[in-house]
Each structure stands twice: as C-alpha cells, then as structure tokens.
Amino acid sequence: MKNKTISKEWLQKHYLELNWTRQMCADKRKVKVHIIDDLIRKHMLEKWRHGVTHKVHNKAVRSKSLNNQVKLNQPHRKMVEQWNKSGTELIKIHASINSAANTLNLSREHIRDCLNPNKKYRAGGYMFKEHKPNKTNHKQFLIRKYNYEVKKAFEKVSA
C-alpha cells in the first residue's frame, strides 16, 4: 500500500478550521484514525490548544440563560455552610458544593469530605456543614426560584 502524505496545512484546515472529527479526516484520506492522531500530536493541533471546545455535530452547546436554569434545577445539590476554623462563627451559606469550591478556589472533593459527619475535615482553613433549611426558608427559596423562572419567561416573551 502506498504511503499517503498528509500535510500539516491540510490537517489544520480540515481538523481545526472546518471542525472535522479525527474519523472524518481519516475517512477522507483513506487512512486509519491512529495515523491522524499521531499527526495531530506531532504538529500540536489538538483542539483544546486552539480554543475549539465542541464538535460540529454536538447539539449540547448551551446558552448562558440555559446554563443558569440548569444550575437552579440541580435536584441533588447540597447547600453548604462555611464556618470559621473553630466552628463557632458562620461565615456564609453557599448554594452548592460546586459554588463554594469556585468561590473559595478549593477542590469540590475536599469540601465534600468535610460534609461527612463521622470525620472532622477542614478545607482551606474552614469547616463545612450541610445546610438543612427549615420549611419556612425552603418555601422562600422555592418562591424566589419560581419568581426567577417567571421573570425569565416574561423577558423571553416581551423580547
């Protein structure tokens, strides 16, 4: 079988600019996918290096408003209380483990480990406890969430 040469320019155009998959490039040039992989690594054309974050056919790309709505509707999220090192002063209540981790620049896993009632872990010099709102607070939270959704729906209709 004759060795087919694939230039860096051709690969850059089709893989990065036209956003083809590795398989599509291999099929077009009639070679195996691992050859395309080797060339991509050799020429440092990985998509993450060039800011390409999704494929052409990926329909899961979300808008900002949809991302916010998904964040609000996470059914298994745990509200987290952030306490000082000695555990005597409540500093803040975070909406989820992820939001606490992002705010404090900590690992989610470390905060999750702190929530284990059998162990007393600390993360970033803070203690964390699961926040269990009473029924009144939870009702207010649900009302705010409902009002937010109604407001967004109204803005969408009026726009």
Image (cartoon, rainbow, N blue to C red):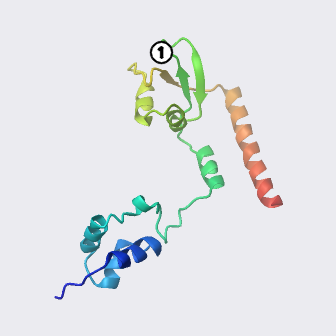
Q: Please report the residue visible at 75 percent of the width from the left and 51 percent of the height from the top.
A: 152
Q: Position of residue 157 (x, y in %)?
A: 80, 60
Q: Please report the residue visible at 49 percent of the width from the left and 71 percent of the height from the top.
A: 56
Q: Position of residue 41 (x, y in %)?
A: 29, 64
Judged from the image, the secondary structure of the residue bearing numbered disc 1 is loop
Of 145 and 64, nearer the camera is 64
- Quick check: 74 above or below 13? above
Of 145 and 63, nearer the camera is 63
- Quick check: 75 above or below 63? above
Q: Please report the residue visible at 57 percent of the width from the left and 14 percent of the height from the top.
A: 89
For the C terminus, which image quadrant? bottom right
Examine the image and state in which quarter residue 115 appears.
top left
- 47 displayed left or right of 153: left
- Quick check: 11 above or below 97? below
Q: Please report the residue visible at 35 percent of the width from the left and 72 percent of the height from the top.
A: 22
- Please rate how many residues cluster around mark 1, counting C-alpha atoms within 10 Å: few if below 14, some from 14 to 19, many from 20: some
- In this view, the residue farthest toward the left is 1
Of 102 and 143, nearer the camera is 102
Q: Which residue is mark 1?
A: 85
Residue type at mark 1: give it.
Lys
- 40 displayed left or right of 141: left
For the N terminus, which image quadrant? bottom left
- In this view, the residue farthest toward the bottom is 2
Q: Position of residue 64 (x, y in %)?
A: 63, 54
- Quick check: 118 above or below 150? above
Q: Position of residue 60 (x, y in %)?
A: 53, 62
- 117 displayed left or right of 22: right
